[in-house]
Image (cartoon, rainbow, N blue to C red):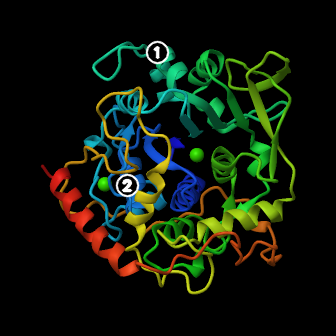
Amino acid sequence: MPIIVDTDIKGDVDDVGALAILHAMADNGEARIAGVIVDTASENSAPCVDVINTWYGRPDIPIGTLKPHDGTAPFQYQGALIDGTFPHDLLSGVDAPDGVTLYRRLLAAEADGSVVVVSIGFLTVLKGLLQSSADDESALDGVALVKAKVKRMVVMGGGFPTGNEYNFYNDAASTKLVVETWPTPVVYGGKEIGETVISGRKLGQTPASNPVRKAYDVYSGANGRNSWDPTTMLFAVRDGAGLFKESEPGTIVVESNGENSWMSSPSGIQTYLIKTADDEAIEGVLEDLMIKAPGMQGPVGGAPGTAGRGGGGAGGAAASGGKSGAGSGGAATSGGGNRPDTGGGASSGGSGAVMAGSSPTAGGGEASRPTAEKQSGSDGCGCALPTTSTGSAASLTALLALIALRRRVTRN
Ligand SMILES: [Ca+2]
Ligand SMILES: [Ca+2]
């Protein structure tokens, strides 16, 4: 299942958590990450995505971004991620392709009706996609291209049955256009879904070299964060999985100020999420994914981090088994994460503007939640997954060869 993530990774750390659990699920073979679109004007957002992708062994996942950039300094945890501590080669969003262009390229390369778009930020670039015209990427205009390629979109936004939520009101005009014209099914994860689900508190069990841990540390100490984006991501990949169900079909209604309401309708192609499990159960699933070492395909827990990062590429390769390109799309490759991004920089960080010193605890509020752990049944379990223990040396050798090849290709 090819996934395109649309993120405002900047102001809130739960975008980092959502990317982390997506990579963990990709390592399980549950999804393939086709690309990531940044919907903020921060030139520091795309490098943050590249840091996370690189940590998980997928350094070449295409990343596009809203343009032009606003020239703002790295914000809060952004500074800690891109100060050179964590490897990545996309050093600025300036070097990333335009988000609409990349959307069109990614969609054109995928099989008809296959793509899941996960929007965990503003709908600004999505508006641009819907308003786009035929170009070198595709002969279809934006609406037709989405209709052909996108199976469904899952959106963190709004509140249900009524709401007034940040992702929606921050760019209300884009929100209104997208929700009123998106031509395929949409599932909305409202603010109320992730509001009381706290995740990220177990990241201290992972290596200090884990940028996800670092981002959460900088943002909120060991207190975790509300899980608006992670819950939405979890549903996008796993559907209900005993944790969520969809509402009756209907249509979302968004006012010009971004407030939303809901109209049930048997002919509607939109739904919103309803929780069917308690928050602790959802937290357990999210935490297990969030602390899963890159590339590991076995159970979580037990000396996280000892697996190192070498297996990441193997996970990426395994994740590419979904439907790929056949029958439609163009010449672009469809292997998970093997397409070169356009980041030109060769070195991996090393300098850059370091803003890490200041670490205001933005967001605030949720620290009041008691940290007493309820050991949910899923902790340390991950039971169903097989442990593959053979062939690791051989696969490591193959992986190193693959990395060497990829470097040559990427660097021209
Ligand atoms: Ca990269
Ligand atoms: Ca977000």
In what element is the residue under mark 2? helix
Residue with the mark numbered 1: 131
Name the residue: 43% across, 76% down: 209
The residue lying toward the viewer, choosing from 359 and 179, is 179
In the image, is residue 226 above or below residue 332?
Answer: below
Q: Is ligand 1 less than 8 Å from the beta carbon at label 2?
A: yes
Name the residue: 59% across, 30% down: 151
Pinpoint residue 109: horizontal percent, then vertical percent.
38, 32
Quarter holding the N terminus is: top right
Name the residue: 54% across, 33% down: 114
Q: Which mark is residue 115?
A: none
Task: Give amino acid for label 1.
Answer: Gln
The Cα atoms of the two marked residues, 2 and 1, are separated by 27 Å
Crowding at mark 2 (Cα within 10 Å: few <14, some 14-19, many 20+): many
Pinpoint residue 123: horizontal percent, then vertical percent.
55, 30
Q: Is residue 202 left or right of residue 340?
A: right
Pinpoint residue 339: horizontal percent, then vertical percent.
30, 46
In what element is the residue under mark 1? loop
Residue with the mark numbered 2: 50
In the image, is residue 64 above or below residue 128?
Answer: below
Name the residue: 54% across, 78% down: 206
Q: Is ligand 2 less than 8 Å from the beta carbon at label 1?
A: no
